[in-house]
Image (cartoon, rainbow, N blue to C red):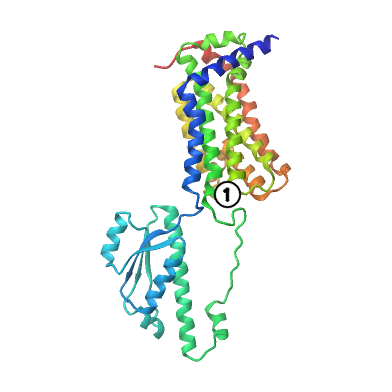
Amino acid sequence: MKVRAGIRLVFSRECKRIPSSKVCIWGIVIAPILSMIILLGMMRNGLPQQIPIAVVDYDNSSTSRTLIRQLDAFPKTNVKFKSLSFREARIKMEKMEIFAILTIPKDFAREAVSGDRPKLVYYTNNSFLISGSLLFQDLKIISTLAAASVGLQTGVAKGYTEGQLMPIVRPISVEAHPLGNPWLNYSVYLNNMFLPGILQLIVMIFTISGFGAEVKSGNGRKLLRMSGSSIFRTIAGKLLPYTILYTIIALLMTSVLYHYNGFPLNSGFLPMFFGYFLLIIASQGFGLILLAAFKNYRFSVSIACLVCMIAFSLSGFSFPGQAMHPSLYALSFILPLKHFFLIYVDQALNGISIGYSMYHYAALLGFLFLSVFFFGRIRKFLERNVYES
């Protein structure tokens, strides 16, 4: 009965404290929901569309105009400026009014037909990685198509049939099948990791803040007395209300991502929701470990923010882990987000048996079990009850 009473007392106290704190309301409830609305709304089209570029057409022939129309027909490219001098186009790129420049040389059509191999020159602004990469792809495609078209016209003019020319112009036929995200939808690619990453950051910060704020207000020893001087009851009662709130937020996220937006979910709802739940308790465990390791409220929060930012890079969703330095690749496995990402790939994208992901589920649960070994240091932190100056 004592155990239940201690946990219940701390739990009810925390349940009253959360609604009275504007920081908790904004940080725990409004911030993740607002992030979800902004990120999903910003990427609602899946890929950036109609990215502005400039074309400097020194040839101004029917062939060059046809080439420009074909480029403008691509959904990702918007030929916003034409017939400019290169200097004017460069100034517009420096002002970020455009993100690429295509230059068509003088006598392009005549030299192409005569076999003099004119050069199409294009510049992309890769300071903006996504727009630069997408425009580079479109410009490369249009250059290849232009070369093939000119070769076909030249061959026909020399008396060859189209059937004879096609194996030369296009010797290899490519059929691509992107797996996991066949639409190449950036919202599927990014938001399935951005939103859990933001949730992880919030969980870690408020786990550390929950105990650090008690010491800051001078209530560290009081909190321990309420639970009967049991650090297990103190931590369980203190964190349980937050765990419930985070789980509701996770349920909302999974519902919006996989049901409302229809993102790939090949193994069903429960494996991914369970992954979110384990990410929450793993992040709470990680936050406790950081607080116990440094026993400094502000410094622990700063380290938690740093760890969560690094986790985006080391998790492997933007840069493959196997291509990282071995030390960084090994380091990534001590971060909860890495294991969540591998669960997401296996369960949501590939839909393989849940047994293959059990190691990662266990790893997330392991962060909570590991934090138990640090409870003694957290007890000393509360007993000392001194906020750093």
Q: Whole-percent x and y of residue 350?
A: 66, 50
Task: Using the image, determine if residue 32 lies above or below residue 188.
Answer: above
Q: Please name the residue shown 42% across and 17% down the image.
A: 388
Q: Whole-percent x and y of residue 128?
A: 40, 52
Task: Using the image, determine if residue 384 lies above or below residue 372.
Answer: above
Q: Please name the residue shown 54% across and 53% down the image.
A: 185
Q: Please name the residue shown 55% across and 47% down the image.
A: 317
On the question of residue 222 being in view, the answer is yes
**In which quadrant of the rendered image does the C terminus lie?**
top left
Q: Residue type at mark 1?
A: Gln
**In which quadrant of the rendered image does the N terminus lie?**
top right
Per the image, the residue denoted by label 1 is 322
Q: Please name the residue shown 51% across and 34% down the image.
A: 32
> For mark 1, does the 10 Å Cα neighbourhood hold few (<14), some (14 to 19), or many (20 or more) residues?
few
Q: Whole-percent x and y of residue 225?
A: 58, 8
Task: Using the image, determine if residue 227 lies above or below residue 263.
Answer: above
Task: Using the image, determine if residue 277 lies above or below residue 221.
Answer: below
Q: Give the total number of marks visible in the rendering.
A: 1
